[in-house]
C-alpha cells in the first residue's frame, strides 16, 4: 500500500499542474522551531493553506457549495486508490493538492456521509496498519474539518510531526500512566491522551468507552469535539486524542493587529502550527501558541472527569 500511494503521489504531481506546483512550493515554505512547556512545536508559513484555514464551515455555506470530496465533483485529473475496510466501509485514497506534509493524503468515504468518527475508529487504525509510512489524522466536524459534511481521514508522512517523532521520549519522561496502555501528557498546553498497544482491539475498546464518556460529560447530542492522530511504530498502535471545547480561538475573530488567521486542527495540536499569512508567521509567539491551545481544548475540570 505504501508503494502504491507513493507512486500515485509522484504521478499526480506530474499530470495535475496545480498539485505539482503546490508540492514544489513546499520546498520554499518557511519553518521555525520553538518549545512550549518542554514540548517541541514548529510554526510553518504555508500560504497555500489559506483555503483550509479560512474555510467557511457554517451550515449555510456548506449547503451552498458542492462537496469537493464526492467523486462527481472532484477534478477529472484527480485519481485515487480504493480502500475497503474490514468493517465494510469503503474509502478512496487521494493526493491532497494543498499539502502540509511532503506526502499528504485525503481519504474520503465513498458515500457522502457526515464527519463522525463513531463506529469508524477501527477503520482509522486499519489504515495506520496498512500505511505504515504515514500517520493518519481525523478532524471533528467542528474541529478543523473543512468538509464536515463528508466523512474523511487525512494522512501525512512520518518524521515530520513533533508528537509522532518524540512520542517514546514523551511517554517515558513527560507522561503519567493512568490505566493499562493509557497515558496523559504532563504539563502539555493542550490536554492530551495517548493510548498505545500492540493490540488494535484494545485501542478500539478503550476509545469507544472514552467516546461514550466524553459525550456524556459534555452533554453532546452529536459528536463530542475532538482531534485524533494514529500510527503504527515497532509493532504498537498509537492513538493520540485531543478533547476540544471550541473550534477557533479568539485571535481568529479579532480585528487589527490582534488578528491571527489560524484554525487549529490535528496537525497544529500535534506540533505544527500552520500560518497561511506571513504577518502571523512573523509575530506568533510561544505565549500565543499556549494561549490558543488552552482556549480550544477542554477545561482542566472536564479533562479530570475524563481521566477519572
Image: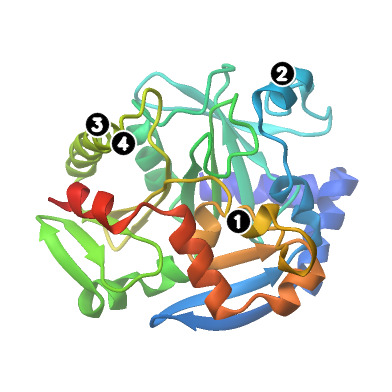
Name the residue carrying label 4: 218
* Label 2 SS: helix
Q: Can I make out residue 225 in this image?
A: yes
Name the residue carrying label 1: 250
* Label 1 SS: helix
Q: Tell me the mark number nearer the camera, choosing from 4 and 2.
A: 4
Q: Residue 164 location, x and y as percent?
A: 42, 66
Cβ atoms under marks 1 and 2 closer than 8 Å:
no
Q: Tell me the mark number nearer the camera, choosing from 1 and 2.
A: 1
Q: Residue 114 location, x and y as percent?
A: 53, 22
**Going from the N terminus, do you reach mark 4 or mark 2 first?**
2
Cβ atoms under marks 4 and 3 closer than 8 Å:
yes
Q: Is residue 85 above or below residue 170?
A: above
Q: Residues within 10 Å of mark 1 (few under 14, many from 20)?
A: some
Is 24 placed left or right of 286 in the picture?
right
Name the residue carrying label 3: 216
Q: CA distance from mark 4 to mark 3?
A: 6 Å
Q: Residues within 10 Å of mark 3 (few under 14, many from 20)?
A: few
Rendered residue at 34%/70% (across/down) = 167
Name the residue carrying label 2: 63
* Label 3 SS: helix
The quarter of the displayed image where residue 247 is located:
top right
Q: CA distance from mark 3 to mark 1?
A: 27 Å
Q: CA distance from mark 1 to mark 4?
A: 21 Å
Amino acid at each position: 500500500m505504501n508503494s502504491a500511494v507513493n507512486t500515485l503521489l509522484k504521478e499526480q504531481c506530474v499530470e495535475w499542474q496545480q498539485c505539482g506546483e503546490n508540492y514544489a512550493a513546499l520546498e520554499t515554505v518557511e519553518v521555525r522551531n520553538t518549545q512550549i512547556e518542554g514540548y517541541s512545536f514548529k510554526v510553518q508559513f504555508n500560504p497555500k493553506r489559506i483555503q483550509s484555514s479560512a474555510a467557511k464551515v457554517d451550515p449555510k455555506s456548506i449547503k451552498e457549495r458542492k462537496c469537493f470530496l464526492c467523486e462527481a465533483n472532484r477534478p477529472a485529473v484527480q485519481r485515487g486508490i480504493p480502500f475497503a475496510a474490514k468493517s465494510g466501509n469503503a474509502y478512496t485514497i487521494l493526493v491532497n493538492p494543498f499539502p502540509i506534509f511532503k506526502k499528504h493524503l485525503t481519504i474520503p468515504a465513498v458515500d457522502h456521509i457526515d464527519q463522525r468518527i463513531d463506529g469508524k475508529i477501527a477503520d482509522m487504525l486499519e489504515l495506520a496498519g496498512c500505511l505504515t509510512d504515514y500517520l493518519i489524522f481525523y478532524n471533528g466536524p467542528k474541529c478543523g474539518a473543512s468538509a464536515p459534511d463528508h466523512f474523511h481521514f487525512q494522512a501525512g508522512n512520518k518524521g515530520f510531526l513533533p508528537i509522532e517523532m518524540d512520542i517514546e521520549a514523551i511517554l517515558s519522561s513527560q507522561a503519567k500512566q493512568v490505566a493499562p496502555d493509557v497515558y496523559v501528557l504532563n504539563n502539555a498546553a493542550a490536554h492530551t491522551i495517548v493510548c498505545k498497544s500492540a493490540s488494535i482491539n484494545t485501542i478500539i475498546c478503550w476509545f469507544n468507552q472514552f467516546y461514550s464518556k466524553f459525550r456524556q460529560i459534555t452533554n453532546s447530542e452529536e459528536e463530542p469535539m475532538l482531534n485524533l492522530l494514529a500510527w503504527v511504530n515497532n509493532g504498537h498502535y498509537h492513538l493520540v486524542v485531543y478533547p476540544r471545547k471550541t473550534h477557533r480561538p479568539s485571535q481568529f475573530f479579532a480585528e487589527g493587529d490582534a488578528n491571527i488567521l489560524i484554525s487549529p486542527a490535528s496537525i497544529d495540536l500535534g506540533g505544527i502550527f500552520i500560518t497561511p499569512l506571513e504577518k502571523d508567521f512573523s509575530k506568533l509567539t510561544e505565549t500565543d501558541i499556549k494561549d490558543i491551545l488552552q482556549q480550544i481544548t477542554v477545561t482542566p475540570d472536564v479533562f479530570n472527569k475524563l481521566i477519572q
